[in-house]
Image (cartoon, rainbow, N blue to C red):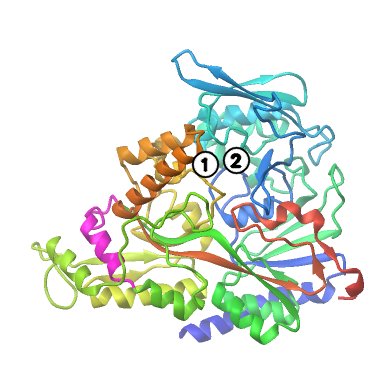
Amino acid sequence: MGRILRAWLAGLAALAALGAAAAARPDDELAIGITQFPSTLHPSIDVMAAKSYILAMARRPITTFDAEWRLVCMLCTQLPTIENGLAVPIALPDGGQGIRVTYTLQPRARWGDGVPVSTEDVRFTWEVGRQPQSGLANAELYRRIADVEVKDDKTFTFVMNKLDFDYAAVNDFELLPAHLERAAFADPAHYRLHTLYDTDPTNPGLYFGPYRITEVAPGSHVVLDRNPTWWGKPPEFRRIVVWTVENTTALEANLLAGGLDMVAGELGFSLDQGLAFAKRHGDRFNVLFKPSLGYEHVDLNLDNPILADRRVRRALLYGIDREAISRQLFAGRQPVADSFVSPLDWVFTDAVPNCPYDPARARALLEEAGWQGEGIRRNAAGETLALELATTAGNRIRELVEQVLQSQWREIGIEVHLKNLPPRVLFGDSLVKRKFTMAMFAWISAPENVPRAMLRSDEIPTPGNGLAGENFTGFRNEEADRLIDAIEVALDRDRRAGLWHSLEALYAEALPALPLFFRADAYVLPRWLKGVVPTGHQYPTTLWIEDWRVAKDMATR
């Protein structure tokens, strides 16, 4: 069946699923379209933008970065600093420096079942994170917190085992309800199978944001209703329904047919689709374009014997005409990446090794690595130079880029087979279990985000560590480990910038992944919806869902 016919049939199926909902949708309900369904609703197991987008409406982090890229409190009442006395450097027994950082939780914060959000939850969450078998993604954060000192029901102190430059940022410390999750954690090795976030995801006690999840239809949609225990500004919409339409052609069809009110910029249309949509339908929708820290790349499994050879990795990159792809598909709005740090970040440097399009150089490197012959190359043992590339199925632009890569790599003698997967399978299984050869996706980071989980040697997910860590490539490099450790404790900005530049250069030379582009996101919004402010980093617009509103002069939808 042809690609166009498949997309058309997928669009018809999606329209049928959303049509009835659109006809019956009241004015105080908002329908949002995204292209991925979460592999789990647990806030700290697996790293996936779809989950973050949905849970941001039902939870709040202790701290986060706002749209101005400033670190701010959300669940805490005051950001701790050394100047205000809430952060106090300490000497450690081993001669190093740590820091005691004190937070007070919002006094009226309660879980959706009425139980107060308390320091008991803080302590329990820390215990879960410290358990190597629990499977929480950012294990390093919990290792860094040497102790939790409880003052009272709302005030606690993190005793950190190192004095980091971002000591107050505990964005990834996602509170878990001790009164509900403790039983599921009784067997830490199987916690990820027993957590209520997957076995009972509509339990109101799991959430404490403006909304709580009231319905989960796997692969289809998630319903969020107003949370009566929410302590903050009341949200305007009574109900939010987040629909998953993995095929972006069908996503556009649903939007135009009225099945959806908007498409999320964080994981919706690609830039080229957004540009084309704005030209055709700019009179009906507001289309906002936001350059972001999103880093589109191809992760390489370095345990693969072919990809373990850096000459092959460099040949792969020399074989891609990234400038032409950016120019022709993205109107030049997505700059080519040579490393993982965006030009928007203050620590960016362009003084790194790069591999511009050079097929002749690529062929020479392959021959040097022992891959010879005309057409598809072979080694001395007669083995074909063949690799497998996966990405998120249904994402039209990724599939198009994938076909360009396949064609250009064939020109230099590499046969590439495409094997695309639903996002929840790619992110929830193939990557974390490292069952892939090459995988194209995006890292969406925070400002000056130290890539410990992505690059450090001890962050490779394995069954032994509960599949924690995000070093899917299996990158092992002592110098990278040293630089990551040094960056974290460098309080002087100039010194830290130099360390960052060294790490970026090392990454561009070693190539554990193939850098492609830095993304710009397209937010497609109805003209009557106000208050949506793109952030340009990993913390989504939905963290401020209570500010979204219907314009007074456009009350009729």
Q: Residue at x 62, y 36 (%)?
A: 170
Q: Nearer the viewer, residue 520 or 428?
A: 520
Q: Is residue 214 left or right of residue 272?
A: right
Q: CA distance from mark 1 to mark 2?
A: 9 Å
Q: Residue at x 53, y 57 (%)?
A: 344
The picture places residue 133, in percent across and down from the top left corner, at 48, 33
Q: Name above or below for residue 36 compared with residue 123.
A: below
**Mark closest to the chain's N terminus, 1 or 2:** 1
The picture places residue 419, in percent across and down from the top left corner, at 39, 67
Q: Nearer the viewer, mark 1 or mark 2?
A: 2
Q: Which residue is mark 2?
A: 172
Q: Amino acid at mark 1?
A: Ala
Q: Nearer the viewer, residue 377 or 467?
A: 377
Q: Is 313 contained in the magenta span?
A: yes
Q: Dot 2: what SS?
A: loop
Q: Which mark is residue 137?
A: 1
Part of the protein shown in magenta = 302-320
Res 373 → quadrant: bottom left
Q: Residue at x 56, y 73 (%)?
A: 271
Q: Nearer the viewer, residue 433 or 509?
A: 509
Whether the residues at callouts 1 and 2 have beta carbons within 8 Å, the answer is: yes
